[in-house]
Amino acid sequence: MAEIKEKSTIVLFSGDLDKAIAAFIIANGAAAYDHEVTLFFTFWGLNALRKDEKLMVKKGWLESMFAKMMPRGADKLGLSRMNFGGMGPKMIKHVLKKHNALSLPQLIELAQEQGVKLVACTMTMDLLGLQQEELMDGIEYAGVAAYLGDAADAKVNLFI
Amino acid sequence: MAEIKEKSTIVLFSGDLDKAIAAFIIANGAAAYDHEVTLFFTFWGLNALRKDEKLMVKKGWLESMFAKMMPRGADKLGLSRMNFGGMGPKMIKHVLKKHNALSLPQLIELAQEQGVKLVACTMTMDLLGLQQEELMDGIEYAGVAAYLGDAADAKVNLFI
Amino acid sequence: MAEIKEKSTIVLFSGDLDKAIAAFIIANGAAAYDHEVTLFFTFWGLNALRKDEKLMVKKGWLESMFAKMMPRGADKLGLSRMNFGGMGPKMIKHVLKKHNALSLPQLIELAQEQGVKLVACTMTMDLLGLQQEELMDGIEYAGVAAYLGDAADAKVNLFI
């Protein structure tokens, strides 16, 4: 008899480093427990998936503004509090390293290794003018309907 | 045999435009999927339901202060980040329009058409001194007990 | 036949007074409904559990910095918006008192009386250098695995 896996979903709406870390720790924990996990990145949460380098993609003026103002990737996010113009994130990264805890880029890598489904919200990508080549490899693309399909089957659904 | 509808609930605690948009997109998506959806507005989330115009309701000093300081309605909300003294919300509204996406007032209207239950938290209304005539028509009024009753039956429960 | 209790879990990630109040109102409501409720405090949410007094615990430099910068206990938290350098929290506390609503310290006490399980996230405690003697009595200590165990069995799971 085939075992049915439990499912969990997390919407990552926030673009804050601390919240992204929390989302990935919960997602990786659930995957380690053999849950089927979907992390759905929407709005500012998409910034965690952006590639580090600047890409020459054609954009309108407003889309270029967004692209410039939003942090480029998991290593550039700020904190939800005590950001202190970038000092806070440095302290958190230092503290993670000191305790041999995983950094956000390492947490993302682990999530991919564990088969956590990383899904970029296509509607937000459209709105903010983000293109697939600007986001990291190995992720999926879908809209709110796909998210709701996963969430309706899941035991644990969080919005972060 | 009568089909039992799936249920979803969302608590909208935040008074940010971007979070309110996300809440309504998920709520409308779930309603389109034939879920029975409850959106429960508490704390700053209530601001999305406020009427645009200034009403002459009798209030104490503190309640008048809250009423003055809090944004009056869905069209007045700020962003959770990149607000830039009101420039950010203008950019987001412009971007929504450009992509033929619904504005927040339109999303609220659609939610009402689809039968999404919009519930204002009476306890917060008491605390902040908001009165029913200050909130939009066609909504319900209830406390945390009613929310929990809905949530205990629902598959997807989010706090935004 | 023994009745099986419904379960609810709330992750309190936020260190904001208003969000902590919301979390405890929902938790106490669910407990009054005879749910088995777990409140899991992680990241800045741990500040709500800190003791008021300054304790002489040995800490590294970075841990001392965190300890100094983070609010010490439920009575010291700020607001997620309209904080106005501490004026906002005073207004909210005044309003709660005026309406005979419970303050955050009273909500915490009620939660403990009702058997709500208050759990401090040990991983965050490690990272921020918080020690058990710095947190209030009568709470439990656990990691994300224990949280997920509770959440997988629960009907209502929220992240605040």
Image: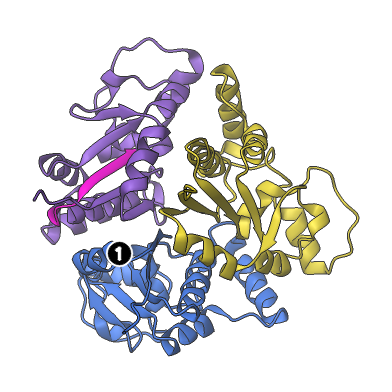
Chain colours: A purple, B yellow, C blue
- Camera-side residue: A113 or C41? A113
Q: Residue C52, position in %: x, y?
A: 42, 84
Residue furthest to the top? A58
Crowd rating for badge 1 (residues with CA inside 10 Å; few <14, some 14–19, many 20+): many
Up/down of C89 relative to B33, above or below: below
Residue flagged by tag 1: what amino acid is it?
Ala
Instruction: Give the mark count.
Output: 1
What residue sits 33% from the left and 12% below the top?
Answer: A57
| Residue on which the image places disc 1 | C151
Residue B55 lies, with reference to residue A57, above or below; the image says below
Residue B36 picture location, percent across and down: 53, 48
Horizontal placement of B8 versus B98: left or right?
left
Position of A131 relative to A108 (above/below) = above
Residue B38 in view of the camera: yes
The residue shown at (19%, 42%) is A116
Query: Looking at the image, which is closer to me, A60 or B136?
Result: B136
Q: Quick check: A72 left or right of C142? A: right
| Residue B34 horizontal/vertical position (percent) | 50, 40
Residue A77 in sight in this render: no
Q: Is residue C85 magenta?
A: no
Magenta stretch, residue numbers: A32-40
Q: Position of residue B136 (x, y in %)?
A: 76, 47
Element on which disc 1 rests: helix
The residue positioned 31% from the left and 55% from the top of the image is A155
Q: B69 or C58, which lies in front?
A: B69
> Does the magenta run of residues contain A37?
yes
* Chain of the residue on which disc 1 is drawn: C
Q: Residue at x 67, y 36 (%)?
A: B109
Quadrant in the rendering for residue A32: bottom left
Q: Could you tell whether B122 is left or right of C32 in the image?
A: right
